[in-house]
Structure formats: C-alpha cells, structure tokens
Image: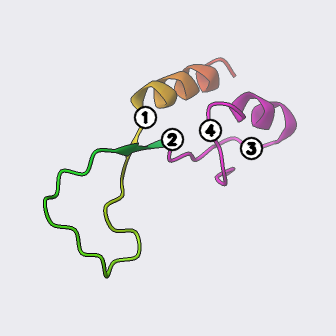
Amino acid sequence: MSGADVKLSNLQKLIAESNASEYHSSARIAASNPLTYINTNVSDYGKVYVADEDDVRAMVGILNRF
C-alpha cells in the first residue's frame, strides 16, 4: 500500500509507476479551529485538519478507472 505523500496531484503517476493495489491519503486541509481555549503546551496547538472532500472524490474517481 502506498501511503506517504499520496495526493491528488501525484496519484496517477503513482498508479502508473507502482504495482500497488491500494493507496492511503489523508487528503487533509487546515480547517477553522472551533475551540475558544488553546493549550499552548501542546506542540501542534490550534491546528485542526479535515479530509478535503473534493480531493477524496476526485481520487476515488481516478482509482475507479483502473
């Protein structure tokens, strides 16, 4: 399973150049943090990430063609 730095921009190249049958991508984007209190003792405080639905949908479309 390919899983390091897989994203929409390189998925077709990975498919063409690898023998992988599965791919893992977080497809993440930064999102607004809904918290009003942020603990600055946490190394990645204030950062919230969610999957980009458009990228996931596009990657599934590419994978369904193969």
- The residue positioned 43% from the left and 34% from the top of the image is 52
Q: Is residue 65 left or right of residue 40?
A: right
Pointer 4 residue: 7
- The residue positioned 40% from the left and 30% from the top of the image is 53
| Furthest residue in direction bottom, as rendered | 41
Q: Position of residue 11 (x, y in %)?
A: 69, 33
Mark 4–mark 2 Cα distance, whole angstroms, equals 6 Å
Considering the image in quadrants, where does the C terminus appear? top right
Of pointers 1 and 4, the one earlier in the residue sequence: 4
Q: Nearer the viewer, residue 12 or 48?
A: 48
Judge depth for marks 3 and 1 and give the one in front.
1
In the image, residue 16 sits, relative to residue 34, either above or below, namely: above
Of pointers 4 and 2, the one earlier in the residue sequence: 4
Q: Nearer the viewer, residue 14 or 22?
A: 14
Pointer 1 residue: 52
Pointer 3 residue: 20
Of pointers 3 and 1, the one earlier in the residue sequence: 3
Helix, strand or loop at disc 2?
loop
Quarter of the view holding residue 40:
bottom left
Which amino acid type is shown beneath numbered disc 3? Ala
- Residue 27 disc label: 2
Q: Residues within 10 Å of mark 4 (few under 14, many from 20)?
A: some
Specify start and end residues of the magenta stretch as a single range.
1-26
